[in-house]
Amino acid sequence: MKTLTLATATAAIALTGAFAQAQDIPVGHLADLTGPTASIGVAYADGISDTISWYNANGGVDGQQIDFETIDYAYQAPRAVSIYQGWASDDVVAIQGWGTADTEALVQFVEQDEVPYFSASYSGALTDPTGEGERSSNAAPYNFFYGPSYSDACRALVQWAASDWDENGDGSTPVWVHMGDNHPYPESPRVACTEYAEELGFEVANPIVYTLAPGDFTAQCLTLNEIGADYAYVANIAGSTISLLNSCANAGTDVQFVSNVWGYDEQVMRAAGENADGVVVAVRTESIWTDDNPGLERVREISGGGDYEVLSYIAGVCSAAYMVEAIGGAGEAGEISGPNIRAYLESQTDWVPEGLDGVCFPSTWTAEDHRGLMTVAVYRGSVNGSTEGQEIAELMNNGTMALDPVAIIELPRRPEWIGY
Amino acid sequence: MAGMTFRPSGDFRSSYAADTTIFDDRFSRRFVVGLVIILALVPIPTVFDLGFDVLSRYWMNLLVSIGYLSIAALGLNILVGFTGQISIGHAAFFGFGAFASVFIYETTSIPVFFCIPLAGVMTAAVGLIFGVPAARIKGLYLAIATLAAQFILQDFFARADWFSGGSHGSVARPLEIFGYSFRSVHAYWWIVLAYVVVLYLAATNLMRSRDGRALIAVRDHYLSAEIMGVNLTKYRILSFGIASFYAGVGGALFAHHNLFVQVESFTIFFSILFLGMVIIGGLGSIMGTIFGTIFITMLPEATEAVAAMLRGGAVDRALNLGSALNYLKEMAIGLAIILFLIFEPEGLAHRWRQIKAYWKLYPFSY
Amino acid sequence: MEGLRLGFLYQLMLTGLIIGTLYGVVAMSFALIYKASKVINMAQGEFLLIGAWICWYFLIEYQLPFWIGFPLTLVVMLVFGILLQIVVLRPLIGEPIISVIMVTIGLSIVFQALMKWLFGVSPQPYPQIFASPNVDIFGAQIRTVYVLSIAVSLVIVGGFAWFFKFSKMGLAMRATAFDQQAAQSLGVSVKSVFAMSWAISAMVSAVAGIVVGVVNSVSSDLSFFGIKVFPAVILGGLDSIVGAVVGGIIIGLLEHFAVYIDLFAGVGNLQQIVPFYVLIIILMIKPYGLFGTKDIERI
């Protein structure tokens, strides 16, 4: 009992003390730094906290500092709800969230409290602010994310695959297959994406299930061989992609893997080595670390002179920058509040946060449509040589690993695609 | 480990009725009734807009969580602590209750108020089905069979579009009574508190009945119980049913608080947390279940608060803790379970009795 | 090939056999602990993880060749197993089953966090250990490391058989498993038998962990393997070491047969879930598994 009273007392102190200074702008940041998605969550969370710190160090938002608190919720939805309620008591004006678990659990809360929620879950279900879309399940007026939705990223890859097949295919009907766990996140784009694949003339095979936790996926690779798949969309996260690529290299699978935004990055290339060669991936940002442009100089400054930052880091920078700029916009329009931030976000068209041109794609959110981005960069990863014992920065610099742009896909903003 | 048989020396009972009272003496009855009344008063200023809050949303949310979790944990304690059956799949039944309540509302559109107990009944039915193997399987084999139940039900949630909305999950409606919406966490607390009081009283009374004693007999020595005429199969399956009913009601209360239910919430880790609550609280102790739930719910909050205080402070800089704090936080729950089992195997309920005994005799220790 | 797709089935079964053997190895180390000390070790998956990380650390940080790093890892795991038993599990002798299960669950949470803390959260590849990653066996590409793991497992199983049959310690362990009190009264140090069983189990798990690490790269998700072991041990019977290996192989085959069925049925995820259905069905028919000892109680 003694420990319990002590614990509650300290909790009370910490929570009242968290947002002490009144003139600061309270913002919440939910991250998975230790849970099952930590392998991709840490870089994204670093991107966000580095960016907000950078704005604070460079004058804040019109002189006001952003008081943000990063809390690790280890991908447990109930923890996210609890942390959120703490922030709601402190009247945060916006939240940077993380995955499917927390974002979906909080949709109704943020709507009720009018707190814009920037997630790194890009589920298509979050893109309909009115709930009136043909296929959308419910309204998510306060959910925003920077980047294409999972469904749209997958559609872009379908489109890329169609043109790739026209150039390099053997004239037969190409076979498209969706691969992912039986889990909300990988399942999110499945129906939307396979429908589009059918529309573009693909033969769509039964989805192949492989777990989010890495394992031996030889069976899945043999299935790929057996059904004669030409394009396999990998919908899981990095760790399980590594296993899949290794298993399939071993099973001699000849298929073009196309990956969602969280499934393939520099870490996967390093861990899977040459087995990761040739995978095509949807990228959220206009440039990657090895590019050179003024916007990227800003990103380097934000990272504090870091060696190399992966794709997700830069996406995190964009997400945070859009939020900070919208807070500034809300401040100019009047009071800094959730509804004003939302109004600012929905009033701009084709905009990029100041100083990040060439890094973030111009995005547009409107009151009827929260699909901020219909543009998807498609990259191909190449690994030519052993990655053993070297860090990502070295490998990218000496050319053992490279990410090369292959296409930029502009998807049509079809009304029937909203919300799913 | 028997909860009701523990008595300090000198505490004599002269009748069977006295032996089965819910509260030992008038003071503890008044204390509990008073506590419930105070807890019921807490949300009033917020709900009726009196301009101040007794407890902020953050604390109310924790109270509500403790409420519905303690109901489900009590179910598990009836199963594990009173009947001696091990279940490593309790979260799946909790989840089933959550989905069932939403499902009942969506298909029949009867008011949410009635959906919650109905979800409990539906979960109890499922629990009875999964309890059938328990008639034959014992001990560790049973523990692993319930582990299988956990994965089978989780797979079912992700698959059954008609029932759970599939992997996308389903949206729950807030509870309404005569047009008044219990959407805010403060108002919802009344509903949860009412369920806690009713179900805890029901459990306490169950344990005073013939059926309750039969359950304890099954736990303590099933062969002797059988010889005395206790129908083993019936009581083993029944305890699964009761446990699932409690889990289902807890889950349904969770659903209409959270307003969104998704398969991801009901993992094996959550099942382990339920076991943690029961063990830390005290196996076979009804009050202990609440203590255990409070402990497990508050532990991450407390470690988070401590971490927030240390972060950037002098200790952090001196020891260069940095990201280690996050891992220490994650470890805390495992450490708590281990330390409790090694140093306080009887749980918080035992400690609570000791504290009571201490104050009863204060200032003399005997 | 069309129709029944027997070639596909053949390849799947071969993969299933190999992966099943790996399950069997882990299940064996699990059953060993249970047989000796009646403890269900829910942290078995973390044993794999720890072994994989330690070996990785030797190979990467100290640049040791595999044939030194590997035995060194086994030595570390041996010490680890003994220490764990002495520090955490010894105080729990005589406590109810549920307490012991919970302690091992607590241990798994602690180890999980500790490993992430020490080695980070991003997956780390193993260096190239074998000259060629694959070997051709009966027309199927099999990874060299699997072949090695089967060889090592055979050696371990053979060693076990010899150990239990002929060595004094093995005899003591068998005696303890048979009747703890009788063994104790005959002068067997039950404590050292318990410690020994944990040590052996940790070592065998480490072998499996390294194999999985070489195949998939090491990350904390590797401990998921520990869950796979339950259907296998239940199938074989908790206290049967041979049963555990057989159970593992059956589960491996079953999983891959489920993939084959899935190709026609298109249900999805059968691979993951079928073992658990089979587990329940088997327990309904044979409550002590296929090879487990039936618990006869006298009043």
Image: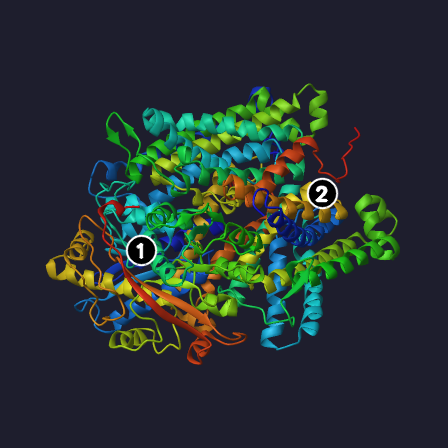
Separation of disc 2 and disc 1 at Cα? 56 Å
Mark 2 surroundings: few (<14), some (14-19) or many (≥20) residues within 10 A: many
Snapshot quadrant of residue C80: bottom right
Label 1 marks a residue whose chain is A
Q: Position of residue B58 (x, y in %)?
A: 33, 47
C141 or A385, nearer to the observer: C141
| Labels 2 and 1 in the same subunit | no
Q: Amino acid at mark 2?
A: Gly
Instruction: Give the residue pinned by disc 2.
Output: C236
| Comparing labels 2 and 1, the label whose residue is closer to the camera | 2
B64 or A380, nearer to the observer: A380
Q: Residue furthest front?
A: A171
Image: A99 above or below B232: below
Label 2 marks a residue whose chain is C
Label 2 secondary element: helix
Query: Residue at point 60% right, 42% down?
Result: C275
B81 or C122, nearer to the observer: C122
In this rendering, position of residue A77 left or right of residue C16: left
Instruction: Give the residue pinned by disc 1.
Output: A16
Snapshot quadrant of residue A98: bottom left
Q: Is residue B241 visible?
A: yes
Q: Position of residue A399 (x, y in %)?
A: 44, 78
